[in-house]
Amino acid sequence: MTTYITTPIYYVNAMPHLGHAYSTIIADTYSRFRRLCGDDVRFQTGTDEHGEKIVQAAENEGVTPRAYVDRISDSFRHAWPGLAVEPDHFIRTTYPEHIKTVQDILQKVYDQGDIYFSEYSGHYCKGCERFLTEKELVDGKCPDHLTAPDEITEQNYFFRMSKYQDWLIEHINSHPEYITPERYRNEVLSFLSEPLEDLCISRPTSRLTWGIPLPFDEKFVTYVWFDALINYLTGIGYPDGPDFEKYWSVAEHVIAKDILKPHAIYWPTMIQAMGLPPYKRLHVHGYWNVDETKMSKSIGNVVRPGEMVDEYGVDTVRYFLLREMSFGLDSSFSSEAVVARRNSDLANDLGNLFSRALTMIGKYADGVVPEVDEATVTDDDRELVNAMEAMIGSYAKSMDSFEFHKALQTVWQVIGRLNRFIVTNAPWELANDPDKAGRLNTVLYFLAESLRILALVLRPIMPVAAGKMAAALGMDESLRNAVLEVDGSWGKMEPGTRVDKGPQLFPRLDTKKKQQPQGQQKKQNKNKKEQAAAQVDMEGMVTFDQFGKVELRVAEIVAAEKIKKADKLLKLTLKAPEERTVVAGIARHYSPEELVGMKVIIVANLKPAKLMGVTSQGMVLAAKEKDDDGNERLVLSTVADDIAPGSRVA
Ligand code: MSP
């Protein structure tokens, strides 16, 4: 199979930030995933360099547009390697081959009568670089830029977009995957339920010269969107490059919701007018806010990719962005949230599993993966294999539908299971009994093989860490060229492979130091004295940091049973989202049957403790009340709405 995935080409009027990094990491992850599936992949990103915004930004810096775009385009190009993003092609709209292609297309569409000259009066928003319709204005202003548009009357060229409206509606209706998630598809269809206006595609050179001249009228330059969208074709050699057809037939675009209209309406109609088949899928994601607020230079909360990587490391940044955002919805970035994910999911769950398993292979098998002793394989082991295989299936399905957070949840369920596998099988006890040597070998092989599969599926998300995992497992080279369908199946780890634990994958981050990106940290230092003074009066209070260390999660009770000889205790099996056992002192207040299906709140990162022989991995929260006679009533804290098990409570 073949894959062609693109990011938006970013305007060079601002330096790369978290939002740009997110779209680009998404496209990179998807391209790595498709490669893992054995596809021939082309991944493209780049910069959008014409138009008024750019001229304005260059003027502000007192340099020519050319010098300006070269400098900022370079900073985009150089931002990606630090995020382990590896595009196959970086396109710039100032490249001569792009300019020529845009002109050829304009000429073709003009010759066939789909571009005409006319006078137009309208509300022009400089920020959007387009005319806004009456309906789009809110209190006479552009809703995105909160500025009143200029009332402009001018002669211009127009693209007959309206001609393709019915075709577009029909195409979207008959291809449910064309625009996803569904909310954006609905938004586009709703917009298309009104008559579509034609698109103004030129700017007079009296107003703007920094653009691609119209081939049929040199007094005009091309409107920046008509120029920019065509990058998706130029980058793969349209019209007669050898790879064009191969990649165009499978084109997929990643964008955020801000540029839905150009991608879901202008672009498909332009493509149709050119006589090309439509792109395959448009993936639309939401917005990253920072601490619940819109990112903006004036607030000073713009998050820079380089700073994030310096602070947390590339794998943590990628993991956080993919795990935290439900693709399509908005999400909030905060340092506390990154540190919490790093410490719980990466350091505790994955990092510990990895180092414990490899330490044990080092200690009990001289660092060499042992052979399974078939006679000692249990039903539980076979279920583990089934769980690993099921994980691969649902991981692949979620990755393919851009539900990265779900893919990671699935992977973390098996990580939880593997951590419990270690506790249940206690290799350190098996090692003490020579009769159990066969069983010990089986357990160690199962761990090594599971780590191999984890390294495989985590590679698209955390390429650097997965590479280290693979190297530690003595299989860096083979994992690099792995194919999910073949190498994802159980049993590919060769007994006899030498493993070497290496350095810790994800050391815990100090919640105090690794707080916030630098700008915010400075402000904080300023207030240190005041804070210290205030703390004198705060005896008994916990700080935000301290509270942040407690990981509260929603958990679904999937099973409950009494514990022998313990009349207060129940053993609960919870999904949060991985399965775990928690012992709760609620037996006098709840029967096991009534608990099943309840969604409760748990402390998820409590150190495991043994109660009446059962290891409890967390604590369920409950409210306690005492009446006048000293009788205690206990009510579990639940969540009012239906929310996915594993959701964080903050
Ligand atoms: N140049 C146009 C795109 C032309 S594509 C043919 C443009 N450039 S942009 O620099 O403004 O980039 C917008 C894109 O950057 C968004 O669609 C999204 O991919 C990314 N993001 C910018 N800010 C973002 C957030 N705060 N959150 C998530 N992504 C955001 O529009």
Image (cartoon, grey):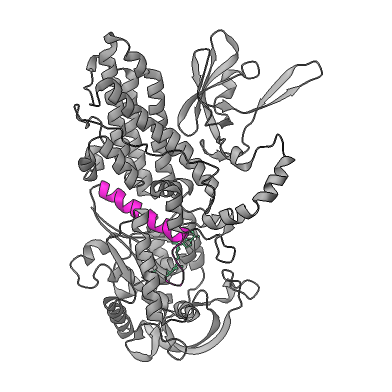
Q: Quarter for ligand 1?
A: bottom left
Residue drawn at (20%, 70%) of the image: 241
Left/right of residue 191 with respect to residue 486 in the rendered view: right
Main SS class of the magenta portion in the image: helix
Q: Is residue 31 magenta?
A: yes
Residue drawn at (29%, 17%) of the image: 440
Could you say where residue 97 lies in the image, as x and y percent from the top left?
A: 26, 77
Q: Quadrant of residue 231?
A: bottom left
Residue drawn at (38%, 18%) of the image: 426
Left/right of residue 636 with respect to residue 377 in the rendered view: right
Q: Is residue 398 magenta?
A: no
Q: How many marks?
A: 0
Could you say where residue 207 lies in the image, as x and y percent from the top left?
A: 47, 88
Residue 388, compared with residue 462, is above or below; it is above
Asked whether the viewer can see residue 483, the reply is yes
Please state which of residues 51 and 506 is positioned toward the viewer in this rendering.
Answer: 506
Q: Quadrant of residue 456?
A: top left
Bounds of the magenta segment: 12-36
Could you say where residue 557 lies in the image, as x and y percent from the top left?
A: 53, 27
Please state which of residues 125 and 612 is positioned toward the viewer in this rendering.
Answer: 612
Residue 395, compared with residue 241, is above or below; it is above
Asked whether the viewer can see residue 163, the reply is no
Please state which of residues 260 and 470 is positioned toward the viewer in this rendering.
Answer: 470
Residue 87, compared with residue 384, is above or below; it is below
Could you say where residue 644 lies in the image, as x and y percent from the top left?
A: 52, 38
Residue 527, compared with residue 104, is above or below; it is above
In what quadrant of the picture does the C terminus appear? top right
